[in-house]
Image (cartoon, rainbow, N blue to C red):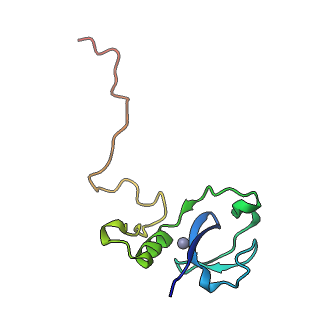
Amino acid sequence: MAVRLRWQQAENQRHAYDTATLSKSGLRPGMPFQTLCERTVTPTQDDFTELGGLWLAETCPYCDRAWRLHAGFPADEIPPLPQKGPPMGVSRGTDNGQVVVTDDTNADPSDDD
Ligand SMILES: [Zn+2]
């Protein structure tokens, strides 16, 4: 039993969906659909390349993983899910040993000892 998965950009991410969950007419702008990451999103006209839209959104990592699992990818080709951490900017500056110092104020032109 073949399941046909497809990608569709919607709500600022490129999600994958199972075409079996849709009617034969397929997706249309303004028509919500269920993604592999178990969300319901609604594409707009700009999300359809055939309607003049552009696919500039990033690939949804959850859909990507779900697709690979579904397609039977080997385990080492299935990336781990991104961690659901706190929002950006909250956890900055923690002592994780990976702080990269890009401060160039140490460049002192008067150091002519
Ligand atoms: Zn998704």
The single residue placed furthest to the front in the displayed view is 1
**Total marks drawn?**
0
- Quarter of the displayed picture in which ligand 1 can be seen: bottom right
Depicted 35 relative to depicted 91: above or below: below
Tell me: 110 left or right of 54.
left
In the rendered image, which quarter contains the C terminus? Answer: top left
Residue nearer the viewer, 22 or 24: 24
Judge by depth and name the residue closer to the eye, 81 or 3: 3
Q: Residue at x 50, y 88 (%)?
A: 1
Choose between 47 and 105: the one closer to the eye. 47
The residue depicted at 62 percent of the width and 85 percent of the height is 21
The answer to whether 25 appears left or right of 40 in the picture is right
Residue 31, image x, y percentages:
73, 77
Q: Position of residue 78 (x, y in %)?
A: 37, 69
Relative to 40, 97 lies left or right: left
Q: Residue drawn at (70%, 83%), measured in percent from left and top?
A: 24
Q: Residue at x 26, y 52 (%)?
A: 97
Q: Quadrant of residue 102?
A: top left
State the residue lying farthest toward the left. Answer: 113
Residue 12, horizontal then vertical, whole percent: 62, 63
State which quadrant residue 83 falls in: bottom left
